[in-house]
Image: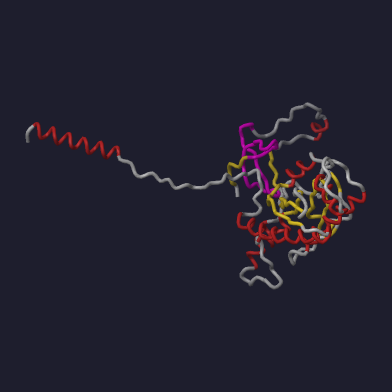
Amino acid sequence: MSDTGANNLSEQRIQQLLAAVGSRPPEDNTQVQTTDYDWHRPHYFGSEQIKKLDDFAKILATAIAGKFTSLCQSDFSVTVVSITQHFAAEFCNETSDSKQEYFLGFGTNRAQLCGVVGVPNETAVVWARQLLGESETEGESDKDLSQLEVSLLSDIASGIIEVLSGSYESFDFRPVDSFVKGELPLKLSGSEVLCKIAFNVKGADSENASDAYLLILCSELDFVAGKTESIGGPNALSPEEVPKAILQHIEQINVNVTAQLSETQLTFDQILNLQVNDILVLGRRVNEPIELKVDGRRVYRGWPAKSAGQYAVVFKEDLK
């Protein structure tokens, strides 16, 4: 083979190699929609369950509109604005900063409330005016209501609770005697999850809509959202389905989780002699993980952290 042939062959081969190296597979332009999972927000209900709650809320809104029409002798429309989930601690902190809301609590009995109708002061003024048959007046959104107006407002909120109670066969909610202002009348633990159904109300002869909301423990809406199935009644489960339903109920039981930094032993005399600003050395090094106990049993190890201004623990080891 001549040198020229060898050179030509080499050049061809080089071109082929360069072409192969430069070639790329076609780009995949498929768009993938992702959503960040926010661990700071509760996820008691999943997306499918929220859809069922939305359908339920729309039916409820239509019934509330009918109640307003009956009370005010005028046509009204009610629109669901949003359905959101909140940890009790977060919502209580939010409402404690605002003293301009009226709350009417409700529950299966007056000693154990499970929800409230929340009415901002501006909405309260508008609703009271509508019940009195008066026209809306600008600049009065911050005024305090008279005793008569609060009583009328209570009639509307009680009507909303009546509609809610009659919207599902297992509901039997009753309102408390009167409104309170500026303080949520629910006794809650920080880990409980609340569902907030926000809606606006608009009269046929009004240009503006007024805002209000229902706030209720998520557990009260389990059956509505399809989170659990009824064990008795017309939709009774089969014997094979009962264990699964029982497990679903067990999964909702609250248990105490304790983050234990460390421990040490002292004599009784040493305890009696402890003074303010004394340093108590614990039996664990600062670079060792802390333990998490569920009802007294060690189940996790983790590292101390902060989240949303509160102490937290990052899980690192499963001891189960």
Q: Is residue 120 magenta?
A: no
Q: Position of residue 112 (x, y in %)?
A: 82, 56
Prevailing secondary structure of the magenta residues: strand
Q: In screen coordinates, is 208 left or right of 150?
A: left
User: As drawn, which residue projects farthest toward the right?
Assistant: 147
Evaluate whether residue 214 shows in this view: no
Q: Position of residue 125 (x, y in %)?
A: 84, 47
Q: Is residue 305 magenta?
A: yes
Evaluate whether residue 5 shows in this view: yes
Q: Nearer the viewer, residue 143 or 204?
A: 204
Residue at x-position 81% and y-position 35%: 268
Q: Quadrant of the N terminus?
A: top left
Residue at x-position 75% and y-position 51%: 213
For residue 96, what is the image quadrant?
top right
* Colouring method of the image: secondary structure
User: As drawn, which residue projects farthest toward the left?
Assistant: 2
Q: Position of residue 122 (x, y in %)?
A: 81, 45
Q: In screen coordinates, is 29 left or right of 16?
A: right
Q: Position of residue 43 (x, y in %)?
A: 64, 50
Residue at x-position 74% and y-position 27%: 279
Q: Could you tell me how many numbered marks the image carries?
A: 0
Q: In screen coordinates, is 317 left or right of 220?
A: left
Q: Decide: is 175 above or below 317.
A: below
- Residue segment shown in magenta: 285-313
For residue 226, what is the image quadrant?
bottom right
